[in-house]
């Protein structure tokens, strides 16, 4: 044995109704290494990590820590063994503060049982300074951005001084700068001797951060490779089983009439006293993809809430296809040409306790094809429609239409939402991070769909934190910074560096390449 | 085969059923223990007579008659449990069902005695009364952000005293009870349609019983098969998603409590318009029917059809309490024992949780055993 393994998961098998999520999988994590786990949506990555973290019990196989067999029955056991996990969908108490969430389950108390929050606060601030994880310890979780929630989760692990750290798709919600920082943090942690398991769909990140990579496909173990000896193409081939095209192919945009016209929009913020969106005006035409780029938390969320009707406007006017919708209800917008792929799929996008088919009709259950005049649901039609979307968008799950949405893998939940929203054939598609958490094959597919929506003469408003996506998919880029649009760029003429400068607020004004 | 057994245990309906049965048995056991403490000599007999209820009568004719009475009391309880579970599925806790029930009772009795209206008008008025009260809670919740539990409890008390006041106008001069509806206004009593003859001419057995069962079935259908139920349950599961897809959240909240209130109010009408019981204008507590509805709803696995059986069971126990030996136990003991059993009935969800844990553990053990056997097999 040349190097000690911190964790070994040997021949793990875990079944769910209708599916073998992990089929005889072996994963060995060396001490002090960053080990990536790669696989398509639904390949079984989260399940494998949940087995390690004690959330599920494997039917077969053993787990060894430092060479000794261990029995991890629940997350407390995992914690005792020094295993920490940042989940794909965060497990935070929405109405608690950041600080309370971090100390939850490991509260520092004095002898009389009173909380010693000051001490905790000091430790948290130290950690967040040391690792550059900026959070406001007193902010309430439901008010802060997904990015900040993520940082809270990471701090939670660091606070507990775990030595085996599981990151389930940590970068899906971060900005490129933050990803850069996170990778640096992970490398530092690895240098300090911590061992890291890192799930990501972004091959660039894996190439940059990881030492080794294990690939799964449809629940099976495909192989483990040294990152030094491989490349993106090989990894994606191992994972998908075919060559993946990383370039988005599209013709020149042919913008037509104005579809969405936003004038002087101002939206109040829930977090701070300042307005989140300040006097923003822009247009989206038929046949173009306009992208709102920016660092998370610069008002993109509220901008979308304003357009889709989830938050009222403080000031301003919105028209859709020439019709004033400033005060229109959400239902009115949804049924008159607007589709919305929401930022937070669990909060808005899905009713997790409903079956997949019920989620597929969430935006159109009231249409005559799904409900009779007397108000009865037409089950047969619902099933057929759902089966059609599942097939068309390759939504994978244990039991098809009747699967509970909660039990589906994150990427497949996302695919279901995308399918539902695009299938409405909208005049305007508002897509917020539509490919978040999707594997390269699925991203390729969704990007093609967005271009197809555009080419069918519809307007697409894309909100993305991912620079690659912004650059390759959009026809026009609007950069948001502190609630304002600070620049309009042409993706063919600008560079990632220039875009970055705008996003950081270092540059303002109509873009170009003077 | 093993696999089949497991999937059966994991089936939600089966689980609810078993959990309910376990809760009932635990309740009986605890009731028995309490009786033992009070007076060990009669405990065994007391608990059997409580469970036996009308079977205590050897004569089938009389037993049938008392079976009928238990059914008469089941109808309103069923309605209250439907009221609770309907709101519960939409994520609301309608503790105001008790007040809605009281309001329905007051209006039904007053309409019958003061205005001598036909029974079906009285019934509709009772339903409307409950609905109005529910709507008030709904509006307070939607527009003023007042929790429905708080407004419900306050309305319970307001209604109780308002009804005491109102019904004083139609009470007997010599007692605190309201006048007998059948003597003042026979047309306000619900028709029996011959049902009374099935229960040894128990005049109180009326169409209230089939009506309540039909409504339970309707509630089930509305919840599971209609667009309306789809919307309401979606709102209950995830408010934000409901808002995102344009469901009228506020309207649905109000509508839910309106319907919940209507169900409870109707339940009161279905009871008092049989003439079985009179309202005591001096009562200082809201009728327990609304609260027992909570237990019935949970014991029935939050399923309208399950509620039919759980409501019957709870009334069976409550009525059965009257058969405790009065020389050994004071009258309140019977209420105490029934309450203990009803209280434990509320633990169904907890029971289900425990059962799941046990099932998981057993599965693990079986797996380990199977593995060991396999290895042995391999060695041979
Ligand atoms: N609790 C559960 N009950 C039933 N099926 C489940 C459950 N959890 C996961 N599954 C199924 O197991 C499979 C693997 O899911 P898992 O979440 O591990 O995928 P993943 O590799 O993490 O995918 P993604 O990249 O989309 O997050 C999926 O088909 C999913 O539907
Ligand atoms: Mg996952």
Image (spheres, rainbow, N blue to C red):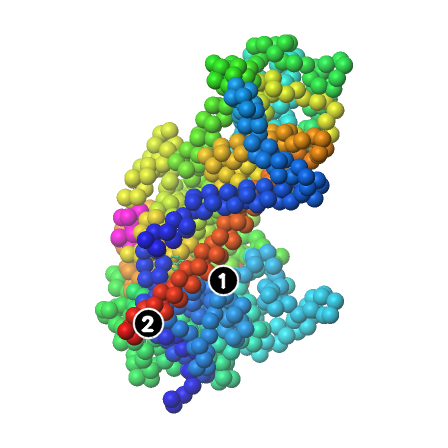
> Is B370 located above or below residue B152 in the figure?
below
Between residue A376 and residue A306, name the one nearer to us: A376
**Residue A271 appears in the figure:** no
Query: Is residue A358 within the magenta segment?
Result: no
Category of crowding for the residue at label 2, using alpha-carbon neighbours closer than 10 angstroms: few (below 14), some (14–19), many (at least 20) = few
Q: Chain of mark 2?
A: B
Q: Quadrant of the C terminus of chain B?
A: bottom left
Residue topped by disc 1: A90
Local SS, label 2: helix
Residue ID at (30%, 75%): B379
> Is A441 located above or below residue B244 in the figure?
below
Residue A188 spot, x, y in % from top left:
50, 82
Q: Chain of mark 1?
A: A
Residue at the limit of the structure toward the right, as seen here: B174
Q: CA distance from mark 1 to mark 2?
A: 40 Å
Residue topped by disc 2: B375
CB within 8 Å, label 1 to label 2:
no
> Is B293 located above or below residue A238 in the figure?
above
Residue B179 spot, x, y in % from top left:
68, 14
Q: Quadrant of ligand 1?
A: bottom left
Magenta stretch prevailing secondary structure: helix
């Amino acid at each position: 044995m040349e190097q000690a393994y911190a964790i070994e998961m040997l021949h793990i098998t875990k079944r769910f109704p209708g599916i073998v999520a992990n089929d005889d999988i072996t994963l060995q994590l060396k001490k002090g290494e960053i080990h990536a786990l790669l696989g398509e949506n639904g390949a079984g990555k989260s399940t494998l990590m949940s087995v390690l973290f004690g959330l599920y019990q494997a039917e077969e196989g053993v787990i060894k820590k430092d060479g000794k067999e261990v029995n991890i029955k629940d997350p407390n056991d995992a914690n005792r063994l020094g295993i920490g996990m940042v989940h794909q969908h965060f497990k935070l108490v929405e109405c608690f503060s950041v600080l309370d969430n971090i100390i939850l389950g490991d509260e520092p108390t004095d002898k009389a049982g009173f909380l010693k929050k000051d001490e905790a606060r000091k430790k948290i601030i130290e950690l967040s300074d040391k690792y550059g994880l900026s959070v406001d310890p007193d902010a309430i979780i439901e008010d802060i951005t997904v990015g900040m929630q993520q940082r809270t989760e990471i701090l939670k692990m660091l606070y507990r001084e775990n030595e085996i750290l599981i990151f389930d798709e940590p970068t899906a919600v971060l900005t490129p700068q933050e990803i850069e920082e996170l990778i640096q943090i992970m490398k530092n942690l690895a240098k300090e001797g911590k061992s890291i398991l890192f799930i990501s769909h972004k091959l660039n990140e894996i190439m940059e951060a990881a030492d080794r990579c294990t690939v799964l496909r449809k629940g099976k173990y495909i192989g483990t490779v040294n990152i030094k000896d491989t490349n993106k193409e090989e990894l994606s081939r191992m994972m998908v089983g075919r060559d993946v095209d990383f370039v988005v192919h599209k013709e020149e945009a042919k913008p037509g009439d104005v579809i969405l016209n936003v004038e002087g929009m101002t939206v109040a913020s829930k977090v701070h006293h300042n307005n989140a969106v300040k006097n923003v005006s822009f247009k989206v035409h038929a046949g173009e993809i306009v992208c709102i780029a920016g660092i998370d938390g610069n008002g993109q969320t509220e901008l979308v809430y304003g357009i889709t009707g989830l938050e009222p406007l403080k000031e301003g006017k919105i028209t859709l296809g020439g019709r004033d919708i400033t005060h229109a209800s959400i239902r009115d917008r949804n049924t008159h040409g607007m589709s919305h792929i929401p930022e937070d799929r669990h909060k808005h996008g899905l009713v997790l306790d409903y079956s997949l088919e019920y989620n597929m009709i969430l935006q159109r259950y009231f249409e005559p094809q799904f409900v009779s005049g007397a108000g009865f649901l037409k089950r047969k039609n619902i099933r057929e429609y759902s089966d059609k979307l599942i097939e068309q968008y390759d939504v994978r799950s244990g039991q098809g239409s009747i699967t509970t949405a909660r039990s589906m893998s994150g990427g497949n939940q996302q695919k279901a939402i995308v399918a539902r929203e695009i299938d409405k054939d909208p005049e305007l598609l508002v897509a917020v991070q539509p490919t978040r958490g999707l594997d390269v094959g699925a991203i390729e597919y969704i990007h093609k769909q967005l271009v197809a929506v555009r080419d069918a003469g519809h307007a697409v408003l894309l909100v993305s934190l991912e620079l690659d996506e912004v650059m390759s998919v959009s026809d026009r880029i609007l950069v948001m910074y502190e609630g304002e649009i600070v620049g309009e760029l042409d993706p063919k003429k600008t560079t990632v560096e220039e875009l970055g400068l705008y996003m950081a607020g270092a540059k303002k004004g109509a873009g170009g390449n003077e | 085969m093993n696999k089949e057994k497991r999937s059966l245990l994991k089936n939600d309906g089966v689980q609810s059923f078993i959990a309910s049965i376990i809760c009932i048995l635990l309740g009986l056991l605890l009731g028995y223990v309490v009786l033992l403490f009070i007076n060990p000599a009669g405990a065994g007999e007391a608990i059997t007579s409580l469970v036996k209820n009308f079977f205590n009568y050897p004569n089938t004719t009389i037993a049938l008659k008392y079976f009928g009475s238990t059914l008469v009391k089941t109808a309103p309880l069923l309605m209250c449990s439907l009221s609770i579970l309907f709101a519960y599925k939409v994520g609301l806790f309608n503790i105001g069902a008790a007040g809605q029930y009281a309001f329905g009772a007051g209006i039904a009795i007053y309409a019958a005695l003061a205005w001598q209206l036909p029974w079906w008008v009285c019934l509709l008025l009772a339903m409307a009364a409950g609905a109005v009260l529910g709507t008030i809670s709904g509006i307070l919740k939607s527009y003023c952000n007042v929790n429905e539990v708080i407004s419900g409890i306050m309305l319970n008390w307001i209604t109780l005293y308002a009804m005491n006041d109102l019904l004083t106008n139609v009470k007997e001069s010599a007692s605190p009870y309201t006048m007998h509806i059948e003597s003042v206004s026979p047309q306000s009593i619900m028709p029996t349609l011959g049902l009374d003859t099935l229960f040894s001419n128990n005049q109180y057995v009326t169409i209230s019983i089939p009506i309540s069962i039909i409504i339970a079935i309707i509630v089930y259908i509305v919840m599971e098969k209609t667009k309306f139920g789809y919307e309401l349950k979606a709102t209950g599961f995830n408010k934000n998603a409901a808002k995102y897809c344009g469901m009228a959240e506020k309207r649905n909240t109000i509508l839910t409590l309106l319907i919940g209130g209507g169900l409870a109010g109707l339940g009161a009408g279905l009871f008092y318009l049989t003439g079985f019981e009179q309202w005591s204008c001096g009562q200082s507590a809201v009728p327990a029917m609304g609260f027992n509805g909570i237990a019935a709803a949970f014991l029935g696995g939050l399923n309208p059809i399950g509620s039919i059986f759980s409501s019957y069971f709870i009334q069976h126990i409550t009525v059965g309490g009257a058969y405790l030996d009065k020389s050994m136990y004071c009258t309140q003991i019977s209420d105490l024992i029934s309450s203990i059993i009803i209280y434990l009935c509320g633990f169904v969800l907890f029971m289900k949780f425990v059962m799941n844990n046990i099932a998981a553990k057993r599965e693990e053990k079986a797996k380990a055993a199977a593995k060991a056997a396999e290895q042995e097999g391999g060695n041979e």
